[in-house]
Amino acid sequence: MAAGDGRAGLPAADVEPGAGDEREGACPIEAFDEAVDLRIVSYRRRLADTDGLCAKWVIDAIVAGGLLEDDRQDCIERIEWVQRRADGAGD
């Protein structure tokens, strides 16, 4: 019981399962066996400065998802980052 507030002390609700590193689903993913070219397209309402674009988190997610073995030069030949203006629907 909390000090003087009259409410019983209850444990916190566990409303979400713990996050894990396992992929869901029964479909195994096979990694590429040769260097790839990546083209990352970002849709934005407001375009960013060219020097403000960063593909690191996207590439890290691709590696974590098992599509690429690593982000070394022998796994990724070339990276192209493209921005497109989003239509702004729903504003």
Image (cartoon, rainbow, N blue to C red):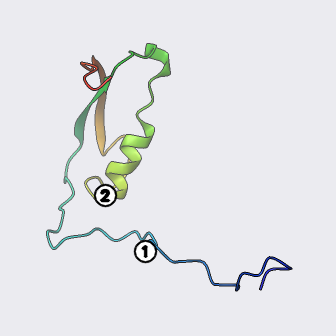
Q: Is the residue 7 above or below the residue 19 in the image?
A: below
Q: Is the residue 65 above or below the residue 74 in the image?
A: below
Q: Nearer the viewer, mark 2 or mark 1?
A: 1
Instruction: Give amino acid for label 2.
Output: Gly
Quarter holding residue 81: top left
Does the image show residue 72? Answer: no
**Is 67 in front, or is 83?**
83
In what quadrant of the picture does the N terminus appear? bottom right
Q: Earlier in the sequence, mark 2 or mark 1?
A: 1
Q: Is the residue 46 above or below the residue 22 in the image?
A: above
Which residue is painted at 31% across and 58% down in the image? Answer: 65
Residue 17 marker = 1
Q: What residue is disc 2 on?
A: 65
Task: Please provide percent x and percent y for residue 10.
Answer: 64, 84
Report crowding for label 2: few under 14, some 14 to 19, many 20 or more residues within 10 A (C-alpha): some
Report crowding for label 1: few under 14, some 14 to 19, many 20 or more residues within 10 A (C-alpha): few
